[in-house]
Image (cartoon, coloured by chain):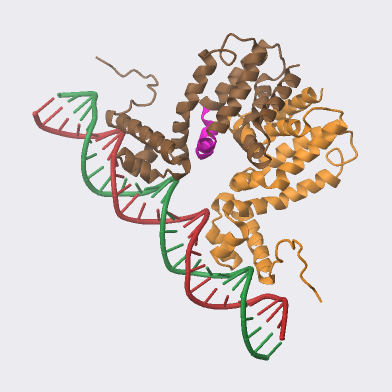
Chain colours: A brown, B orange, C green, D red
DNA sequence: GGTCTAAACGGACCGCAGTCCGCTTTCATT
DNA sequence: AATGAAAGCGGACTGCGGTCCGTTTAGACC
């Protein structure tokens, strides 16, 4: 006999139809993004493809940016998994400096890879606490491991900043700088900061 | 008697009415942005306030982002002037390291100050070659002055990256980090990089 | 001043993101 | 199984960015 005690009982559970709809929306969005490309995916299309009304999309995902952030999140999660438990040097097992450099390269490539999706996710992609704060936390951990001292959270942010898409795109698309040079420059930055 | 030699004669000159319209559009946009705030300024409003048709706006400024970038450019230009010829330590006269630190602080504040406008300018704000490449050039110059060697263009980009609005906003709005701490962390970064 | 052409103009029009509100479904309770 | 209320649903509707194209105008040349 469940009695209601005066505790914070969190957000109310999701209704069955709501869950079903969310999954089918996400699946439809993922499929459409893969086949047509992000820019050609409209909310109406996703809605009709998922077999729901437009209002449902917006109730579940807040905005187009929110939906795209959710799509992006699927690949982001996979990437995080390979950082946490994948093979070295990205995953655990390699010495910290090697891990850090591998991390930077990997993130650089990942960001360029899903560039259009990241852009479409916009602020929502940035502020998904998961995305940014995971990377920051990991870098912080590696810096501590390397014996760096100082304001680690902000130092981590500082060395992650050049890997942000806005910066990368300027360099790759506008200035035609080859990726290898970006990697080398990032390695240099890290060594200066750590050293 | 002007004869037409086979030379590249650049872009054709702007017609008088076109110039007049551009100015009145820019003035109207500036005024509206100041009074109502960026987010409440629609293209239709700007058009009617400037006394021109909507088509004219888009022919002159390409897009809403382009128009906002043009508005932003007016304050950006003032800022550049104070870097080039203002009083030290931001302007010339102070030792390079002091200038560099003053530059970072100034840019940090400037970015936060015109946050909404920068966001509204979006990609157009980023890629206005003037904005980014001026800052990069200046930092490059100061680094050279300080005897730093390495890939200076990319090193400059790297230390400018944490000052980008996307990064700052995450820290200030999301993580509630006080500005003074951001300044201190940037100083620390610079000192590590310069060695 | 007349004429001719390229440039500029402007507002009707379109597509899409996002809102609103009356209807439907779920499910806890009995 | 019946019931009631809260959560969910969906599609018509709005507002804005952006385009299109028939009309107007600047200004070069005669």
Quarter of image, res B157: top right
In the rendered image, residue B7, in percent from the top left (x then y), is placed at 76, 62
Above or below, A88 against A169 in this view is above
**Which one is in front, A116 or B9?**
B9
Quarter of image, res A11: top left
In the rendered image, residue D16, in percent from the top left (x then y), is placed at 50, 54
Q: Quadrant of the N terminus of chain A?
A: top left
Please say whether residue A123 is one of the residues in the magenta stretch.
Answer: yes
Look at 67% across and 19% down and name the residue there: A152
Q: Quadrant of the C terminus of chain A?
A: top right
**Which one is in front, B63 or A39?**
A39
Query: Is residue A50 visible to the viewer in this orientation of the structure?
Result: yes
Please say whether residue A121 is one of the residues in the magenta stretch.
Answer: yes
Q: Relative to A87, is B188 on the left or the right?
A: right
Quarter of image, res A183: top right
Look at 65% across and 51% down and name the residue there: B69
The chief SS type of the magenta part is helix
Query: Is residue A55 visible to the viewer in this orientation of the structure?
Result: no
**Which one is in front, D28 or A100?**
D28
In the rendered image, residue B180, in percent from the top left (x then y), is placed at 72, 30
Number of marks in picture: 0
In the rendered image, residue B54, in percent from the top left (x then y), is placed at 54, 63
Look at 76% across and 24% down and name the residue there: B188
Above or below, A26 against A2 in this view is below
Report the magenta residues as a range.
Answer: A115-129
């Amino acid at each position: 006999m469940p009695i209601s005690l005066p505790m914070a009982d969190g957000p109310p559970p999701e209704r069955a139809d709501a869950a079903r709809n969310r999954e089918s929306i996400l699946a439809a969005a993922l499929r459409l993004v893969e086949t047509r490309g992000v820019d050609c995916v409209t909310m109406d299309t996703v809605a009709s493809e998922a077999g729901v009304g437009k209002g449902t999309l917006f109730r579940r995902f807040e905005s187009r940016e929110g939906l795209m952030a959710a799509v992006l999140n699927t690949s982001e999660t996979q990437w995080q998994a390979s950082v946490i438990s994948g093979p070295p040097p990205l995953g655990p097992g390699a010495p910290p400096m090697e891990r850090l450099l591998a991390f930077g390269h990997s993130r650089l490539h990942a960001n360029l890879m899903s560039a259009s999706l990241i852009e479409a996710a916009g602020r929502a992609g940035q502020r998904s606490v998961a995305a940014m704060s995971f990377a920051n936390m990991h870098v912080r951990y590696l810096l501590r491991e390397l014996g760096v001292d100082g304001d680690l959270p902000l130092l981590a942010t500082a060395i992650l900043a050049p890997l942000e898409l806005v910066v990368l795109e300027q360099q790759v698309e506008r200035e035609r700088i080859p990726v290898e040079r970006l990697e080398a420059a990032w390695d240099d930055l890290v060594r200066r900061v750590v050293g």
